[in-house]
Structure formats: structure tokens, C-alpha cells
Amino acid sequence: MAKTTWKYTLREIIIVIIGITIAFSMNKCADNLKDNKLRKEYLTNLKSDVEADQVQLLKNIEAIDNKIKICSEIIPVLNSEKDQDMRLMNNIFAIIKYENFSPKNITYKTLINSGDLKLIDDFKLKTAIQQHYTNYEELSEVYMRHTSLIKDYLGNYLVNHADYDQIQNGKAPFLNEIKLKNIVRALLTTFDDKKATSKLVAESCDTLIKEIDTALDYY
């Protein structure tokens, strides 16, 4: 009788252990499915963000190229024997408009702030994501330097060193042409930096998009 009870007890213990193991496996499987779904959503949204950023950067590069060309046309005219006309003024006002770049980084910030970056278990992909958004910080600094030069120097010049009454005579209003020429030369340098950094980040966008596509195919 005791032997039968022992066998029965052992069988019940084994059944309980098997039940717990099955339940644990099912929970783990459900968690894995949930994590995988969330990971795909993050990567899909992140890809969409980066694609939008790349489009904006390419537009900026095109606009910057045009302004580099305009600067190259302005410099030979200033402080020269050439007559100033309204085209010079139009060119100056064309380069004062600056391109902004505001990255779509909500998905990335959510990944970081929620701690869900750990869901990205591919080390290469995780590194590529973090490096890409570090590149945005460098790009922001370049854009800020350029914007500061326009506001603090060119903007100041247009307020304090121009006689706009000259426009009525069909002439450009700029008084101290040497000062303006130096400002435009400085701007040309920042345009070059802005273009080069924008190109690097646009290439980084392309690289990250490919990495995300590979990960999405795998998951």
C-alpha cells in the first residue's frame, strides 16, 4: 500500500513538473513572439524615419550646391570695377536663407528612453543605429555654425552697412564691399562644410536602411 502511494505521489510530482515546464515554455514563446513583433515595429518605424531624413538631406544638398554657385558669382563682383546691380542684391538675399534639418528621431528616442534598445540583439545593427544618430549630433553642430554666421555677420551687415535708398537708382545698396566680400567667403567655407557633412549623413542613412532591411528579412 505504501509502495503504491509512493508511486502515485511520484507520478503527481512528475505531472506537476511537466505542467510547469510546458507553461513556462508557452509563456516564454509568447514573450518571444511579443518581443519579435515589437522589434519589427521599431525597425519599420525607424526605417521610415531615416528614409524621410535622407530625402530632406538630399534636398538640402541640392539647395546648398546652388548657394555655393551663387557665392562664387558674388565674390568676383564685390570690391571690383564691375557695376553693382539688382542681381547682386538678389544673390545676397538668396544666400541669407538657410536650410534647417530636424531629424525624425522619435522612434530612436523611444528605443533609448524605454530601454527597448535591448530588443535589437544584432550587435552590428545596434552599433549602426547608435553611430547614425551620433552623426546627427555632428551635423547639427555644422548647421548651427552656419546659421550663426548668417545671423551674426551677414544679417548684421545688411542692417548696419547698407543704403537701401540706392535701390531706387537701380543699384545694390551695399556700402562696405570688402567687409561683405569677407563675410561671403566665410559663408562659402561653411556651405562647403555643411554640404560635406550632409552628404556623409545621407550616406549613413543609406547604410542604416540596408542594415534594417537585412534585419527585417531575418526576423
Image (cartoon, grey):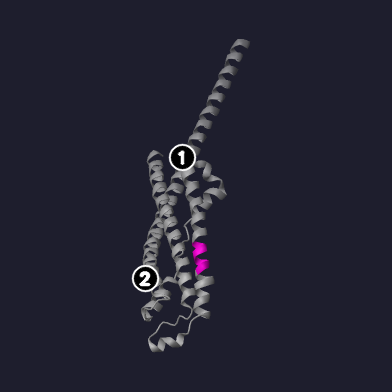
| Residue 34 x %, y % | 48, 42
* 146 w.r.t. 19: above or below: below
Q: CA distance from mark 2 to mark 1?
A: 46 Å
**Quadrant including the N terminus:** top right
Q: Which residue is mark 1?
A: 124
Residue 34 seen in this snapshot:
no
* 97 w.r.t. 53: above or below: below
| Residue 5 x %, y % | 61, 14
Q: Which residues are magenta?
A: 143-149
Residue 99 lies in quadrant:
bottom left
* Badge 2 amino acid: Glu
Q: Residue at x 51, y 67 (%)?
A: 149
Residue 144 lies in the magenta stretch: yes
Q: Is residue 149 left or right of residue 218?
A: right
How many numbered markers are drawn? 2
Q: Residue at x 38, y 59 (%)?
A: 58
Nearest the eye: 4 or 139:
139
Q: Residue furthest front?
A: 81
Q: Which residue is mark 2?
A: 73
* 22 w.r.t. 129: above or below: above
SS at circle 2: helix
**Quadrant including the C terminus:** top left
Q: Residues within 10 Å of mark 2 (few under 14, many from 20)?
A: few
SS at circle 1: helix
